Each structure stands twice: as structure tokens, then as C-alpha cells.
């Protein structure tokens, strides 16, 4: 698992430490990854500075198995485990 945001590496490191995430947070300051994964919000969106929260399950070959809009980050773990179990069948 990794997280990606538009924040700087320094901001991501602080955020990761503050929240004690056991996974890395990568910085996409030029939003190129966000564009590729279609999570960049439109200019008029009041949250345009932030990517949409979407979780991708990607197989070892690089194929996207699932793309899930995450509306409850704290509760998403259960869904992620279910998606992973379903993909392994």
C-alpha cells in the first residue's frame, strides 16, 4: 500500500509521522500521476488543491483490478481486504 498526494515530500513526511501510517506517502507535486489516474479535480471545485480519494488495487502485472472511491478513509480497510481477497480467487 502507498498513498499519493499533491503535497510536498516534507509535508507528506510530517503527515505520515503525525498519523503513524505504516506505508509510504509519495508526492505528486506536478500532478502527473493524478492526471494519469484521473483523480485531479476541476479548477472550479472547492477542493481543487486535493486529489479525489480513490483506492486502486493493482495486480503484479500492473493491471488495475479495482478502483474504489473512498468516502470513509477510516473505514476503508475492510473494503480493501475484501477487494484483495476477491482478486485472489
Image (cartoon, helix red, strand yellow):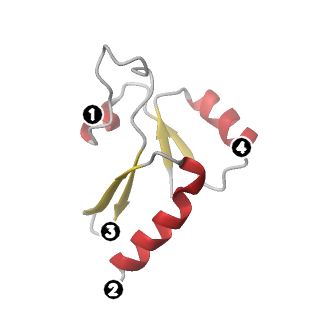
Task: Kindly check if marks 2 and 3 are in contact, taking CB atoms under 8 A apart as contact.
Answer: no
Alpha-carbon span between mark 2 and mark 3:
13 Å
Task: Kindly check if marks 3 and 1 are in contact, taking CB atoms under 8 A apart as contact.
Answer: no
On the image, the x and y values in percent for residue 87 come to: 34, 76
51 in relation to 71, above or below: above
According to the picture, the residue beneath numbered tag 1 turns out to be 35
Indicate which disc, 3 or 1, sits on the residue closer to the N terminus.
1
Q: Residue at x 66, y 42 (%)?
A: 16
Work out which residue is located at the far bottom of the displayed protein and give it: 89
Between disc 1 and disc 2, the foreground one is: 2
Question: How would you rate the neighbour count of disc 3 (Cα within 10 Å): few for under 14, some for 14-19, many for 20 or more?
Answer: few
Indicate which disc, 1 or 4, sits on the residue closer to the N terminus.
4
Q: Secondary structure at mark 1?
A: helix
On the image, the x and y values in percent for residue 85 come to: 42, 78
Alpha-carbon span between mark 1 and mark 2:
31 Å
Question: How would you rate the neighbour count of disc 1 (Cα within 10 Å): few for under 14, some for 14-19, many for 20 or more?
Answer: few
Quadrant assignment, res 39: top left
Closer-to-camera residue (18/33): 18
18 in relation to 64, above or below: above
Indicate which disc, 4 or 3, sits on the residue closer to the N terminus.
4
Quadrant assignment, res 41: top left
According to the picture, the residue beneath numbered tag 2 turns out to be 89
47 in relation to 3, above or below: above
Q: Secondary structure at mark 2?
A: loop
According to the picture, the residue beneath numbered tag 3 turns out to be 59
Q: Residue at x 27, y 68 (%)?
A: 61
According to the picture, the residue beneath numbered tag 4 turns out to be 19
Alpha-carbon span between mark 1 and mark 4:
26 Å
Closer-to-camera residue (49/60): 49
Amino acid at each position: 500500500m502507498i498513498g499519493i498526494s499533491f503535497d510536498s515530500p516534507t509535508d507528506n513526511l510530517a503527515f505520515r509521522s503525525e498519523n503513524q501510517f505504516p506505508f509510504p506517502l509519495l508526492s505528486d507535486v506536478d500532478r502527473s500521476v493524478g492526471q494519469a489516474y484521473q483523480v485531479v479535480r476541476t479548477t472550479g471545485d472547492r477542493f481543487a488543491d486535493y486529489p479525489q480519494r480513490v483506492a486502486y488495487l493493482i495486480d503484479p502485472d500492473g493491471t488495475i483490478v479495482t478502483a474504489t472511491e473512498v468516502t470513509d478513509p477510516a473505514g476503508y480497510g475492510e473494503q480493501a481486504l475484501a477487494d484483495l481477497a476477491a482478486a485472489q480467487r
